[in-house]
Image: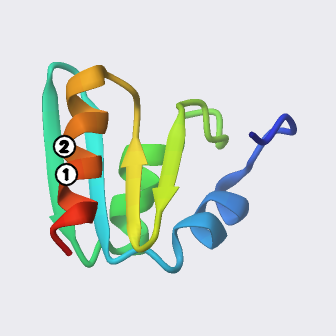
Amino acid sequence: MESAPVDRAGTLALARGSRRLLAKAGVDIVRLTAPSDADVIKYLVHEDGFLRVPVLVLGDLLVRGFTEDLYHEALAWERHV
C-alpha cells in the first residue's frame, strides 16, 4: 500500500499497463477496455490533482474504489481472462 500522495503523473504511470478499468462512480460501476489517459484522469485523479481513492492493480486490470461487489467482479473477471 502506498502511503505517500500520488499525483497526476504518478497515477498515469500506475495505470500505464492497464488494458481494462473498473471504476466505482457513485452507485454505478464503469467498465472500460483500453482506458485512455483522459479516462484515467477522469476516474482516478481528484480535483486537487492527487489520487484519493483505493486502487487495485490486478494484472492488466485497474480497479478504482472499493465495494465487496466490485472486488468480486474484478476477481471473477481476472479468473476468466
Asked if marks 2 and 1 touch (Cβ < 8 Å), the reply is: yes
User: What residue is shown at x 30% (from left), y 59% (from top)?
Assistant: 21
In this rendered view, identify the residue nearer to me: 5 or 57: 57
Residue 27 falls left or right of residue 1: left
Number of numbered callouts drawn: 2
Q: What is the x, y in percent for residue 48?
A: 64, 33
Residue 65 falls left or right of residue 67: right
Residue 39 falls left or right of residue 31: right
Residue to which mark 2 is pinned: 73
In this rendered view, identify the residue nearer to me: 25 or 70: 70
Q: Quadrant of residue 70?
A: top left
In this rendered view, identify the residue nearer to me: 46 or 15: 15
Counting other residues with Cα less than 10 Å from the Cα at mark 2, is it few (<14), some (14-19), or many (20 or more)? Answer: some
User: What residue is shown at x 78% (from left), y 42% (from top)?
Assistant: 2
49 versus 59 height, above or below: above
The reply to whether residue 32 is visible in this rendering is yes
65 versus 77 height, above or below: above
Q: Which kind of residue does numbered mark 1 sit on?
A: Ala
Seen as rendered, the residue at the extreme front is: 79
Residue to which mark 1 is pinned: 76
User: What residue is shown at x 40% (from left), y 74% (from top)?
Assistant: 60
Task: Kindly state the secondary structure of the residue where label 1 is placed.
Answer: helix
Residue 47 falls left or right of residue 49: left
Q: CA distance from mark 2 to mark 1?
A: 5 Å
Q: Which kind of residue does numbered mark 2 sit on?
A: Glu
Q: What is the x, y in percent for residue 61?
A: 37, 64
Counting other residues with Cα less than 10 Å from the Cα at mark 1, is it few (<14), some (14-19), or many (20 or more)? Answer: few
**How is the protein colored in the picture?**
rainbow
